[in-house]
Image: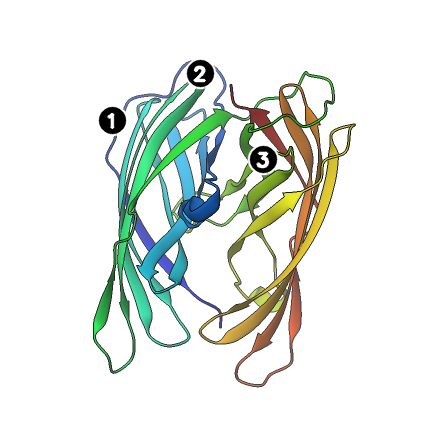
Amino acid sequence: MPRRILALAVLLAGLGAAPAGAAVSYGGGSLPGGRGASRAVGISFEPDDAGRLALRFDTRVLCGRGERYIVSGNAFGPWDGRHVLLRGTGRVALAAGRLTYRWVLKARLGPLGGAGRVRVTGRRRVRGRRTRACRLHPVRPLRVLPNLALTGAPTAAARNVTYLGLSRQNVATGAPGADGVRGSVILRTTPRRRLRARWTADARCPNGYQLGPITTLTPPTQVGPDGRFARDRAFRVHYANSVVRYAAHLDGELHQDGATGNLRVVATVAPRDGSSPFVCDSGVHAWDVLRRG
């Protein structure tokens, strides 16, 4: 069985009604470059018309010596339509030992988007050995934009532009009462007008097997003069009870006010108990992001 993430979240913000009008979803996070890339965050906020909020984020806990582990937090409950304050704990089963972690998330949302930060720390325990603190760069800033339809024409890539949004696939949150929130999508162009991306998808497995959402980093990719791009990436992840080979695909088109496209991830799972490998597939899902600034 793959890594399991157990998260407990308590919504501490106000308990008033949601803002008037249809609820608007938000997506984004942060995608630093260079040495800061391991501190990236993906986050999705999904309010409903009943004054409730579902949320999911993922980032990495940094333990030093090159050790870094993806962790997530989620929540579902009433909110005041503007302020979010969350605390949570979780546990990740590793191939050797386990990771326990704590997080605090603060954010403020409005009609034009939102901003906040998440603080995450952990402790890494190896079987038969002492624990190690995981507290490197614990505070991660984040920004989100509303998930709205694009109106601008296709355009070529500009330098140093960030795009924030969501896919159209629900990913499991584990929060009681929430059916799921859509996966976060972040794009960022480089000084050479190439495009990097960070996105989350959920590859669904046969026989009820739970692999869980996977976050993919798309390396710098050439963008055509018409704003179109496409990139495939293959990578392998070693979980506590399986080894998984991922094949991830992202394509899209830049517009004056954002970008849109499709994503897909296919996972081949090889259980460590020697049973036959099997395939999990997210299917093809559209995504939409808005240009920041």
Q: Which residue corresponds to the image point at 48% horizontal and 69% vertical from the top-left?
A: 2
> How far is disc 1 from disc 2 in space, using C-alphas?
18 Å
For badge 1, the amino acid type reads: Gly
Badge 2: how crowded within 10 Å, few (<14), some, or many (20+)? few
Mark whose residue sits in front, 1 or 3: 3
Quarter occupied by residue 131? bottom left
Q: Are marks 1 and 3 in contact (CB under 8 Å)?
A: no
Q: Which residue corresponds to the image point at 55% horizontal and 66% vertical from the top-left?
A: 209
Q: Nearer the viewer, residue 92 or 171?
A: 92
For badge 3, the amino acid type reads: Thr
- Please tell me whether residue 22 is drawn above or below residue 59 in the rendered image: above
Badge 3: how crowded within 10 Å, few (<14), some, or many (20+)? some
> How far is disc 3 from disc 2 in space, using C-alphas?
28 Å
**Residue 111, numbered circle:** 2
Residue 132: image location, x then y, percent = 24, 67
Mark whose residue sits in front, 1 or 2: 2
- Please tell me whether residue 195 is drawn above or below residue 239 in the rendered image: above
Badge 1: how crowded within 10 Å, few (<14), some, or many (20+)? some
Residue 145: image location, x then y, percent = 49, 25
For badge 2, the amino acid type reads: Pro
- Find the residue positioned furthest to the front: 192
Judge from the rendering whether residue 208 lies leftward or rightward of residue 65; answer left or right: right
Q: Pointer 3: what residue?
A: 190
Q: Pointer 1: what residue?
A: 14
**Tag 3 secondary structure:** loop
Query: Which is nearer the N-term, disc 1 or disc 3?
Result: 1
**Tag 2 secondary structure:** loop
Colour mapping: rainbow
Query: Which is nearer the N-term, disc 3 or disc 2?
Result: 2
Q: Is residue 288 visible?
A: yes
Q: Which residue corresponds to the image point at 60% horizontal and 27% vertical from the top-left?
A: 159
- Please tell me whether residue 23 is drawn above or below residue 20 in the rendered image: below
